[in-house]
Image (cartoon, rainbow, N blue to C red):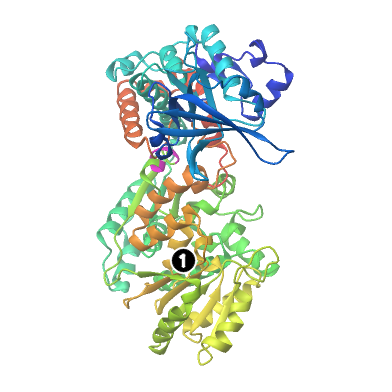
Amino acid sequence: MFVREITENIRFLKKVGPKTASLLEKLGIKTIADLLYYLPRDYDDRRIITPIKKTIHMDRACIKATVTAHDIIGSSRKQALKVFVQDKSGTAALVCFGRNFLARTFVVGKTFYIAGSFSFRFGEIQTTSFDFESADKPDLSSFQRIIPVYPLTEGITQTILINITTQALEKYGIGVSNELPDGIMEKHRLPDKKTALRDIHFPQTPEALEKAQILLKYEELFYLLLVMKQQALTRKISRTIRKPVAGRFKEQLLARLGFSLTDDQAKVVREIENDLFSPHPMVRLLEGDVGSGKTLAGVLACLAVIEAGEQAAFMAPTELLARQHAETIARLVEPLGVRTAFLSGSIDTASRRHLREALMSNDIDFIIGTHALFSEDISFKKLGLVIIDEQHRFGVLQREKLMDKGAAPDMLMMTATPIPRSLALTAFGDTDISSIKTKPPGRQEIITHLAREKNEQKVYDRVRQELEKGRQAYFVYPLIAESEKLELKNAEQMYDHLATKIFPGFTAGIIHSKLSEDEKKSAMDRFQSGELSFIVATSVVEVGVDIPNATVMVIEHAERFGLSALHQLRGRVGRGTDQAYCFLVYSDNLTEDAVKRLKIMMETNDGFTIAEEDLKIRGPGALLGVQQSGFFKLTAADITADFDLLTTARDDVEEILAKDPGLLQEEHKVIRNVLAIASPFQGGYTHVGTL
């Protein structure tokens, strides 16, 4: 029997009544299978006895010490027992809050094993959270072994979880079957499943624990990758092969540009073109760092489809970005005879009706717009390619609505937030991925500086030097207006302050999400034309705004922004050939994660490296915006820490499928079993909202 098939309720276990069952449910434990897969977060190795004086350097330690004295501390109403214990290295105090009755147990002169977290406080080594057992006891059940440490909730103790897990293993664990193919088990010398379950909860040795962890981690990753391969197969529907084209539009556009594609751009364009003229619809993710030239690669793909007599749609997450794309694309392709159009929710009714009719009659070749493109009243004569810019800002259902407007159209998703390798193998495991890592010639690395909030005058002086050279600058703030809850600078107040007191001799503008689309467009048009020297904004300028003359980005309260947002904002400058600068102004009382983010920003401009570090800090759920969806709730594995195991599982899956391609058919008994076992992350995968 597979573990997931043990669906008996935990109420079948002794001492699990309605109240305990209700509390366990808060931990996600309803069935025996849930309990067996509720893995320890840590282990307390009580086989090792630590001298008292060395305990303060450890998270947890086990000592063997003799009681020397008692004391009572605190006020008369809240008195607490303090027990002093001693070994050859020193003395420690056991502070027994709410457990004064232990005075009868801790008899002076008796020796105990004591396990807990020790620290140096009030001039002594002490602990307030500890377990103990008399050294005179013949059966040291809680000591001289490795004890699991589980995540808890109020009302559930370690003792409760240890006791019921022991019962579950004794009653159900002995009947657990292996789930991986025999060949895989033998190849990697993996322990059998029932042994691994026992050792993951109650390991006899560190070596046994490591083997159990490898089995459970590998098993999860193997299931996940196999499920994704199966899902990828369902996408491989056949279609009529698109007739080859001469590439006339592509040649004409590249000749007009006057520069050559980078090697990465050329490689990506070839990969996309191979997909466009294949018997299966393309589903490809194009990732590239800020300013790497993804948009041009996407436009060339659209031109190939348009030359074949079909239509292309290019969707962006905001009207500001969509308009900029529309203006840029129109300048590039309209001289070639390509008919372009723009659509957003702010387009008036008459213009919208005209666009709708033109799309249906094939009088528009290339349309650029916002989510308005997938509105029910919008239809296409022959939609051949859908491009989705900043794809992580759109949900799966939104993308599917646009795809449904054509007969198996190709889809190219683009992102300036590179996908870490481990996520590429998992979250996008059923998607082909292309990467542009090199930037166009002439671009310089952006120089990043950190500045305390109190030293921002130095930042202003440096910005003034750039403005006096005729360059332009951004000032970004986390809030639009003053907040009663947060004492943070905001865009509206700082706009007045910067314009009137700091840079009175320069023209300023402001842009944020509460302005109308016309107001935002007007501000950005003035900034782009050079009429404005600097612009004050929120993170609304994070994506898409391309001003080659802007050389300075100042981000205030930088600790309030995520790593990806900081990198995207920094990427708004350095779009030309002049040296660009980014100033990260931070407040006091930084969190540990904030320190990590700022340090990473100082160390590298490489978006791929930053993406890997962001994954380590936030985890895959937060990085993809699916923290609450159930997606990637792996029980044992960590796709970052276990990347080597992930690649091993991928290679094994591909090897197995090469020998038995029919395994992925839904009627195959192996895939039926795997889909049933892997349902927790399969279900999450199919309904993720922002992938």
Q: Quadrant of residue 397?
A: top right
Q: Position of residue 250 (x, y in %)?
A: 33, 63
Marks counted in the figure total 1
Choose between 134 and 130: the one closer to the eye.
134
**Which residue appears at 59% of the width and 39% of the height?**
629
Q: Position of residue 492 (x, y in %)?
A: 63, 76
Tell me which secondary structure the magenta stretch mostly adopts: helix
- 474 left or right, relative to 19: left
Q: Position of residue 259 (x, y in %)?
A: 27, 71
Choose between 219 and 71: the one closer to the eye.
71
Question: Could one spot residue 32 in this view of the protein?
Answer: yes
Q: Is residue 441 above or below residue 167?
A: below
- 18 left or right, relative to 312: right
The residue where tag 1 is placed is 569
Question: Could one spot residue 37 in this view of the protein?
Answer: no
Choose between 221 and 361: the one closer to the eye.
221
Q: Is residue 451 a member of the stretch shown in magenta? A: no
- 455 left or right, relative to 191: right
Which segment is the magenta one?
Answer: 423-427
Q: Quadrant of residue 214?
A: top left
Q: Is residue 649 above or below residue 448?
A: above
Count neighbours of disc 1 (C-alpha within 10 A) and say few if under 14, some if 14 to 19, many if 20 or more: many
Q: Is residue 648 above or below residue 627?
A: above
**Which residue appears at 65% of the width and 69% of the height?**
351
- Amino acid under disc 1: Leu
**Which residue appears at 39% of the width and 16% of the height?**
204
